[in-house]
């Protein structure tokens, strides 16, 4: 086999072995014998050694999951510019002139810059604003098709698009409840997936990476050919965007060929990109203030259809926001039948002057999302509802900047209740497993839940819950065990879980420390005292005071407190012994159940835990001090101490240290 055939075989083996593992472990069935599995596995190991390519989803590697508190920012070595655009095929032909060019998909996902050192993935950074992006290296390691190891050992920098295909997009949306939480399009889903703080979530989303540009390959000569760069990236195991070498005579037929594929192409694309083949010529053209001169984007011309507006549907979200949705006579657009389009807000609704029976033109933005293009009648007769479509509560129009939107003012609105319960059971709050938003919505609809205390009495509905779809005796018992375990919690988790406006995890912890974990003091505190807490301004103080002043919130809390056992941290004169110190925690722990527990202890003593090593880091806590992880490398580079969990406990958590001896 040649190198390309070996890479194809690697992908085939990874897919077959993963499918066999899923069948065996998740579905309790065998699709191949142990002998066959072992034979294929050994073949994969040999091919990975021969080629130097190891894919992120290969069964020979185990990509560890890691949660971070924030995504660190990093400035790109060279600015990532947008592309000039055209919808005219003739203009595209004229732009090309007598040059050859590479024509490729313009994928609609999230642009990522990858850096490899000594054949290993070292860094992944999002495009961000073009100047500064977010470091998402841990998440990139879970991209379904990304090689973690490559044969080339020099420094390699490339750009590509992280994407989620339509099939996976629809699967993920099907698994979500019928609420406003559903993702609007694959790009939004991909953007959220790539930028998760917990890369285990990213791994479940089947994110894929397609390379579209080589920035630098140390010491290599590509003989002035962009196509040769694409070939090199393929040889390293990357999937590259589908592309074709064109000239002035062939570009229009090539565009038509891509256009025919768009209807059945699973990867979201909002057009094509044309880049000159000649690398020296490309470099000589330079750039404008906004665009590189060696590439241009071709956007599909929007297909317009005229139809009749039948009604405006008002869709309430869990935040109280009520969005108008246009329902119209079905029309064929880009190969599919569409009959509805979001109007987004009151400002757009009024700008279009919509009225029932109006003749409107509709299109699919980027050939994907139905939108209203123009209102030909402009009767401007749609009435804004004065009552919420979910709860019947009073609505009001609020203006943020220049945008007017409709909101439900009823705090007991069912849509808002779902949000409140979802936050209350989340990981950073009471941390109850088995209570997805869809499950909570079902429990609310059936009257099992009215306020938070009801969660601790779901045993009353055991027979009904066991009969519900997705439940059985085992899953019900697991749910009850998780809820019982959540009774032992902390005051910061409770304060955050109550859903007080503007109170996040960090603010909840700061407030609890300031009031010495005394809930009564916190409930009775005035705005002036609250404002004195570091990081709490007037807005947060007012929201906190107003929440506890409301009688209904007081009743909810009074019913809830008997269900909980609040663990109060030990506090003494040395409670702030870690004040002003920044720590980073990575890897598995031995003395603490998880990193979150150690983080809470550090923060209780006034310290701060961050997600990345910087010059301000006091020390990096990692039981594998000799690890070659990115955090260890960064700590060594900045001369930040790397200490084990046990050393940290001796140096920072002992009474001797806290007494200042």
Image (cartoon, rainbow, N blue to C red):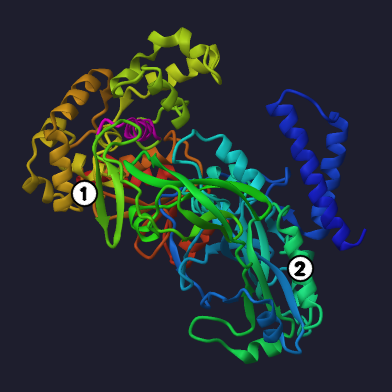
Say which residue appears at 49% left-offset and 72% top-offset.
130
Is 144 placed above or below 548 here? below
Find numbered disc 2 in the image and state the secondary structure of the residue it sits on: helix
On screen, residue 466 versus residue 46, left or right, reads left
In this view, the mark in front (1 or 2): 2
Is 204 placed above or below 349 here? above
Distance between mark 1 and mark 2 Cα atoms? 75 Å
Is 433 placed above or below 358 here? above
Residue 345: x, y in percent? 36, 52
Can I make out residue 573 in this image? no
Say which residue appears at 76% left-offset and 37% top-offset.
19
Residue 421, magenta (yes or no)? yes
Assess whether mark 2 and mark 1 are in contact (beta carbons under 8 angstroms): no
Say which residue appears at 27% left-offset and 22% top-offset.
565
Check residue 261 in the rendering and tell me which mark sits there, or answer none: none
Question: Which residue in the structure is indicated by mark 2?
Answer: 256
Q: Which residues are magenta?
A: 411-426
Question: Which residue in the structure is indicated by mark 1?
Answer: 660
Q: Residues within 10 Å of mark 2 (few under 14, many from 20)?
A: few
User: Which one is in front, 166 or 48?
Assistant: 166
Can I make out residue 245 in this image? yes
User: Which one is in front, 52 or 316?
Assistant: 316
């Amino acid at each position: 086999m040649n190198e390309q055939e070996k890479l194809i075989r690697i992908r085939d083996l990874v897919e077959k072995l993963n499918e066999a593992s899923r069948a065996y472990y998740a579905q309790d069935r065998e699709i191949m014998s142990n002998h066959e599995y072992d034979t294929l596995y050994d073949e994969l190991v040999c091919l990975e050694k021969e080629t130097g390519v190891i894919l992120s989803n290969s069964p020979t590697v185990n990509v560890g999951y890691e949660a971070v508190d924030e995504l660190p920012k990093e400035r790109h070595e060279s600015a990532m510019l947008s592309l000039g655009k055209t919808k005219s095929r003739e203009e595209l032909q004229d732009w090309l002139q007598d040059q050859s060019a590479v024509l490729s998909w313009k994928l609609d996902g999230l642009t990522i810059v990858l850096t490899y050192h000594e054949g290993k993935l070292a860094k992944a950074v999002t495009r961000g604003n073009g100047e500064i992006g977010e470091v998402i290296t841990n998440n990139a390691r879970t991209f379904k098709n990304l090689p973690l190891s490559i044969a080339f050992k020099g420094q390699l920098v490339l750009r590509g698009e992280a994407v989620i295909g339509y099939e996976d997009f629809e699967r993920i949306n099907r698994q979500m409840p019928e609420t406003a939480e559903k993702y609007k399009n694959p790009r939004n889903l991909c953007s959220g997936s790539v930028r998760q703080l917990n890369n285990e979530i990213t791994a479940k989303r089947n994110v894929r990476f397609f390379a579209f540009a080589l920035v630098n390959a140390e010491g290599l000569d590509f003989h002035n050919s962009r196509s040769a760069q694409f070939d090199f990236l393929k040889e390293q195991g990357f999937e590259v965007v589908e592309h074709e070498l064109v000239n002035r005579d062939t570009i229009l037929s090539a565009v038509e060929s891509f256009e025919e594929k768009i209807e059945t192409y699973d990867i979201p694309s909002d057009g094509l990109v044309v880049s000159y083949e000649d690398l020296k010529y490309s470099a000589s053209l330079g750039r404008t203030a906004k665009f590189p001169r060696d590439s241009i984007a071709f956007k599909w011309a929007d297909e317009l259809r005229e139809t009749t507006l039948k009604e405006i549907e008002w869709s309430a979200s869990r935040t109280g926001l009520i969005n108008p949705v246009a329902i119209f006579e079905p029309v064929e657009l880009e190969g599919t039948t569409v009959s509805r389009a979001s109007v987004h807000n009151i400002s757009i609704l009024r700008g279009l002057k919509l009225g029932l029976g109006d003749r409107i033109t509709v299109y699919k933005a980027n050939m994907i999302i139905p939108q209203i293009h123009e209102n030909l009648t402009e009767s401007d007769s749609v009435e804004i509802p004065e009552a919420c479509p979910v709860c019947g509560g009073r609505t009001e129009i609020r203006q943020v900047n220049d945008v007017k939107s409709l909101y439900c003012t009823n705090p007991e609105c069912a849509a808002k209740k779902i949000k409140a319960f979802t936050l209350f059971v989340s990981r950073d709050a009471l941390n109850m497993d088995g209570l997805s938003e869809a499950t909570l919505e079902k429990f609310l609809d059936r009257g099992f839940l009215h306020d938070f205390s009801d969660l601790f009495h779901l045993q009353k509905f055991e027979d009904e819950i066991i009969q519900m779809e997705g439940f059985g005796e085992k899953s019900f018992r697991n749910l009850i065990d998780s809820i019982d375990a959540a009774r032992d919690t902390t005051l910061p988790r409770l304060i955050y879980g109550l859903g007080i406006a503007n109170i996040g995890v960090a603010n909840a912890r700061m407030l609890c420390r300031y009031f010495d974990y005394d809930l009564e003091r916190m409930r009775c505190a005035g705005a002036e005292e609250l404002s004195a807490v570091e990081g709490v301004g007037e807005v947060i103080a007012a929201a906190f005071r107003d929440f506890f002043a409301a009688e209904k919130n007081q009743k909810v809390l009074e019913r809830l407190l008997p269900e909980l056992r609040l663990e109060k941290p030990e506090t003494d004169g040395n409670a702030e012994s870690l004040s002003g110190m920044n720590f980073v925690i990575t890897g598995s722990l031995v003395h603490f159940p998880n990193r979150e527990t150690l983080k809470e202890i550090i923060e209780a003593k006034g310290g701060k835990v961050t997600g990345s090593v910087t010059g301000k880091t006091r020390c990096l806590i990692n039981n594998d001090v000799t690890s070659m992880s990115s955090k260890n490398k960064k700590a060594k580079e900045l001369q930040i101490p790397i200490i084990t969990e046990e050393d940290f406990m001796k140096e920072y958590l002992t009474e001797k240290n806290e007494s200042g001896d």
